[in-house]
Image (spheres, rainbow, N blue to C red):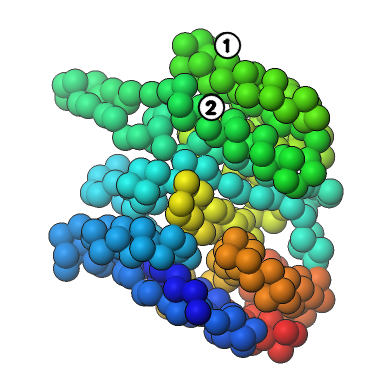
Amino acid sequence: MKTVTLIPGDGIGPEITEAVQSILKAADVQINWDIQTAGADVAQIEGTPLPNRVIESIKKNKVALKAPVTTPIGKGFRSVNVALRKELDLYANIRPCKNIKGIETPFKDVDIIVVRENTEDLYAGEEEKVNDDCAKSIKTITRKASTRIAQYAFELAVKENRKTVWAVTKANICKLSDGLFLECCKEVSEQYPSIEYKEILVDNLCMQLVQNPQKFDVLVLPNLYGDIVSDLTAGLIGGLGIAQGANIGIDCAVFEPVHGSAPDIKGQNKANPTALLLCAINMLKYINENEKANKIEKALFKVIEEGDVKTADLGGSSTTSEFTSEIIKNL
């Protein structure tokens, strides 16, 4: 039986985690959950939001499923997500965005994979306060990180039978840093003649994504642009409630939804577990439990397409529990 680290998170995290666990159990998925708490509540008890035991658990088990953890804005501890990615060198953040039948949006036939470099750029958190009126953030782009994320993007394109990889930067302004990222992408593209390589500026990309998202395929971006653009692409398919993500390293992987911890609806049985469930499905495929993954995915998509039982963010009025029960019924 495979052991997987499970981080329930905070806010709505424990609720959607419980929902996903119950669905996997109903689908007869054989997993031993190594439950590890992290976040603001843990920080009050253990003095850190990310105790070393969490890192060691993921290193040992190699795979983790993680619910959202609240990150304070403008003060307090740094993001647990960012710390995990740096500690475990989870260099590739993968966020697929594809229309789901039953979720109405103004955009049809969207099928984009965002490949985000996950370890450097402004997200590395290299900041300093110069004086009371000035603060600096350091943007670091390296050849090593840029090359390996480009290689991951092209390998993924080949694996998923994709046609085009778009390198996204602001190299017209950040000529040295983004210029280096672009240079590395271009060099890697030459190793993959079967995949078309294109370049686009991030502001132009954002405009075109809301005009003609169907033209885009695989996007590879530095860290900050990747975070922003992946939320935009999530909006194209119905919002963060259905947006999944994966953080992939050389020998570890952490699967987590894109959305936050939504403390405003904590404990109200309103949260949509779809994004975390999609992450769990992707995780099952990662550990070669493809049959169980496909079974759960079909049940989820059937419930959404039928539309009788939907949470509020999907335009319905069902509770988390009702939505979960309906998926289990359709297994």
> Closer to the N terminus: mark 2 or mark 1?
2
Q: Quadrant of residue 266?
A: bottom left
Amino acid on which the number 1 mark rests in the picture: Asn
Per the image, the residue denoted by label 1 is 172
Residue 143 x, y percent position in the rendering: 47, 21
Q: Does residue 94 appear in the picture of this structure?
A: yes
Neighbourhood count class around disc 1 (C-alpha, 10 Å): few under 14, some 14–19, many 20 upward: few
Residue 285 x, y percent position in the rendering: 64, 64
Q: Is residue 93 found left or right of 263 in the rendered image?
A: right
Counting the numbered discs, the total is 2
Q: Does residue 275 appear in the picture of this structure?
A: no
Q: Nearer the viewer, residue 274 or 107?
A: 274
Q: Vertically, is 171 above or below 313? A: above
Amino acid on which the number 2 mark rests in the picture: Thr
Q: Vertically, is 56 above or below 176? A: below
Tell me, for residue 105, which label it has, or none: none
Distance between the Cα atoms at labels 2 and 1? 20 Å
Q: Residue at x 60, y 38 (%)?
A: 152
Q: Vertically, is 132 above or below 50? A: above
The C terminus sits in image quarter: bottom right
Per the image, the residue denoted by label 2 is 147
Q: Residue at x 20, y 26 (%)?
A: 129
Q: Is residue 133 found left or right of 69 in the rendered image?
A: left
Q: Residue at x 72, y 40 (%)?
A: 157
Q: Secondary structure at mark 1?
A: loop
Q: Residue at x 81, y 71 (%)?
A: 305
